[in-house]
């Protein structure tokens, strides 16, 4: 592992300590790899999603938004291939009664002999591999009966394909155009783990880009480049992300080409996002299963065709983990150790903290005035408890880029010191200029190297 990659334990500990992420149902002993997001976790996750929406909707004019249902017609999953193909080969161990993914055996520990992989210890007694469907099954309606079976969606993408016709009709778009969606997905993963990297309930940010078939290869390249740059623009170190093209035997049943954006997680290089050239597989399948025509008629050329699809599919939680890992730093400042999240300001849960140096002499009152002035502009915190050093450490740990400190001079000349989280430089700014000063800082470019 690269020396500059923090251990997962340290990130998990910070998330717990500062209330970003908690193990779910903790008072009942937890429920296998499920997590709840606390205040700062929600703010950070919302910022990740907002930046994705911005890149998809605000920064361009060829993508529209969608929010489809989690429970869809069961035929959707027949058509998509998830009912038949969304299976992992599993083996059971008769000795320890645990179940493992066959293709993960080499990375897993034997529960009876942790120094060995499952199947390698003397006691191990593995069964033949068998298929296990990753979709969560449920029933629609009050009675469990045949015909009422439904599934929690294992990806958001199918909700987009089944709405292709609706969107085409109402959005006044024509290929090339995209439909973007963020939402929860559910997979009964056999080996969840590594904190929020792989869970059974997670959020996805998926966009299906519909293009004339001949243009698919160039749009595939376009999206590879766009999605890599998105992570780098949001502060990910360029040498900690890479693109990896899938080998032919790795490709999903629908894909004629897939590349993963990989990030150097504490567990090693792993998928952050998949970008696939899905051809016309999905629209053709849904047309066949539903009997609806899912195609585009170009009135200019008189041509009728089924668009091809380029799909960038990312995980919100996994992206959040990458941003946390990348931003995490421990360093010595004036003889003291500090932990700091050097998050991009656009992602930072709190942008500004207002701190009176002491809790007297009119400083809290003036601080409150500053806080009230900043609050409508950005997520701001007011904190007067504990020593100033301790309050700085706290803001450093949640990644607040700027701390505004009110001291005795502030009462004389209505200025505050603005402390920069990363450089630790302090500048004096007039209280009246503060909202504009902060807005300018947020708008300024921030460590955004372009990829080669
Ligand atoms: P993996 O190989 O890691 O299981 P995948 O190739 O099955 O992932 P996709 O179906 O391409 O994943 O889903 C797109 C994105 O959704 C992934 O790149 C990842 O960021 C996220 N994702 C998928 N499964 C999970 C999960 N169980 N927990 C958290 N995020 C997930």
Image (cartoon, rainbow, N blue to C red):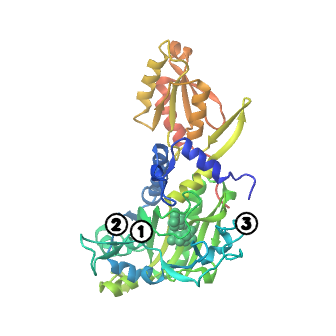
- Is 388 placed above or below 436 here? above
Q: Nearer the viewer, mark 2 or mark 3?
A: 3
Judging by the rendered image, the residue that carries numbered circle 3 is 115
Residue 175: image quadrant is bottom left
Dot placed on the residue nearer the N-terminal end, 2 or 3: 2
Q: Is mark 2 within 8 Å of ligand 1?
A: no
Of residues 83 and 59, the one nearer the viewer is 83
Quadrant in the picture for the N terminus:
bottom right
Query: What residue sits right under mark 1 in the picture?
Result: 156
Dot 1 lies on which element?
loop
Residue situated in front as seen by the camera: 124 or 323: 124
Q: Is mark 1 within 8 Å of ligand 1?
A: no
Q: Residue at (68%, 73%) from the top-left corner?
A: 106
Q: Is residue 87 left or right of residue 286?
A: right
Q: Is residue 445 above or below residue 167?
A: above
If you read the primary sequence from the N terminus, does the residue marked by circle 2 or circle 1 appear first? Answer: 2
CB under 8 Å between callouts 2 and 3? no
- Across and down, in percent, residue 201 comes to 45, 62
The local crowd at label 2, few if under 14, some if 14 to 19, many if 20 or more residues have their Cα within 10 Å, is some
Please report contact status of discs 2 and 1: CB closer than 8 Å, yes or no: yes
Vertical arrangement, residue 284 with respect to residue 351, above or below: below
Q: Is residue 46 in sight in this rendering?
A: no
């Amino acid at each position: 592992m690269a020396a500059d990659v923090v251990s997962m334990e340290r990130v998990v500990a910070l998330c717990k300590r500062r209330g970003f992420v908690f193990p779910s149902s903790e008072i009942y002993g937890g429920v296998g790899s499920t997590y709840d997001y606390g205040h700062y976790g929600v703010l950070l996750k919302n910022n990740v999603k907002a930046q994705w929406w911005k890149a998809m909707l605000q920064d361009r004019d060829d993508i529209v938004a969608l929010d489809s249902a989690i429970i869809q017609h069961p035929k959707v999953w027949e058509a998509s291939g998830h009912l038949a193909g969304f299976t992992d080969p599993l083996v059971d161990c008769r000795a320890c009664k645990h179940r493992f993914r066959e293709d993960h055996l080499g990375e897993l520990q034997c529960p009876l002999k942790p120094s060995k992989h499952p199947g390698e210890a003397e006691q191990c007694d593995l069964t033949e591999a068998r298929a296990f469907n990753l979709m969560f099954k449920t029933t629609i309606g009050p009675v469990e009966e045949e015909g009422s079976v439904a599934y929690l969606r294992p990806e958001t993408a199918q909700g987009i394909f089944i709405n292709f016709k609706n969107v085409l009709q109402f959005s006044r778009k024509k290929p090339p155009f995209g439909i973007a969606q963020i939402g929860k997905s559910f997979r009964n993963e056999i080996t969840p783990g590594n904190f929020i990297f792989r869970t059974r309930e997670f959020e996805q940010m998926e966009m299906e880009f519909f293009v004339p078939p001949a243009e698919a290869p160039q749009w595939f390249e376009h999206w590879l480049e766009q999605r890599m740059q998105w992570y780098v623009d949001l502060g990910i170190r360029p040498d900690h992300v890479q693109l990896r093209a899938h080998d032919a035997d790795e490709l999903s049943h629908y894909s004629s080409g897939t590349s993963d954006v990989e990030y150097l997680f504490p567990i090693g290089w792993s998928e952050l996002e998949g970008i696939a050239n899905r051809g016309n597989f999905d629209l053709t399948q849904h047309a066949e299963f539903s009997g609806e025509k899912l195609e585009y008629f170009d009135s200019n050329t008189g041509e009728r065709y089924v668009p091809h699809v380029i799909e960038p599919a990312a995980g919100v939680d996994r992206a959040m983990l990458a941003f946390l890992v990348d931003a995490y730093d421990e360093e010595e400042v004036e003889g003291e150790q500090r932990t700091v999240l050097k998050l991009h300001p656009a992602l930072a849960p709190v942008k500004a903290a207002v701190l009176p140096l002491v809790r007297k002499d009119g400083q809290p009152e003036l601080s409150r005035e500053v806080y009230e002035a900043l609050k409508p502009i950005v997520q701001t915190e007011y904190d007067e408890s504990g020593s100033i050093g301790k309050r700085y450490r706290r803001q450093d740990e949640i990644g607040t880029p700027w701390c505004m400190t009110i001291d005795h001079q502030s009462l004389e000349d209505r200025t505050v010191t603005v402390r920069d989280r990363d450089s630790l430089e302090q500048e004096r700014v007039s209280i009246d200029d503060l909202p504009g000063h902060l807005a300018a800082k947020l708008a300024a470019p921030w460590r955004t190297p372009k990829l080669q």
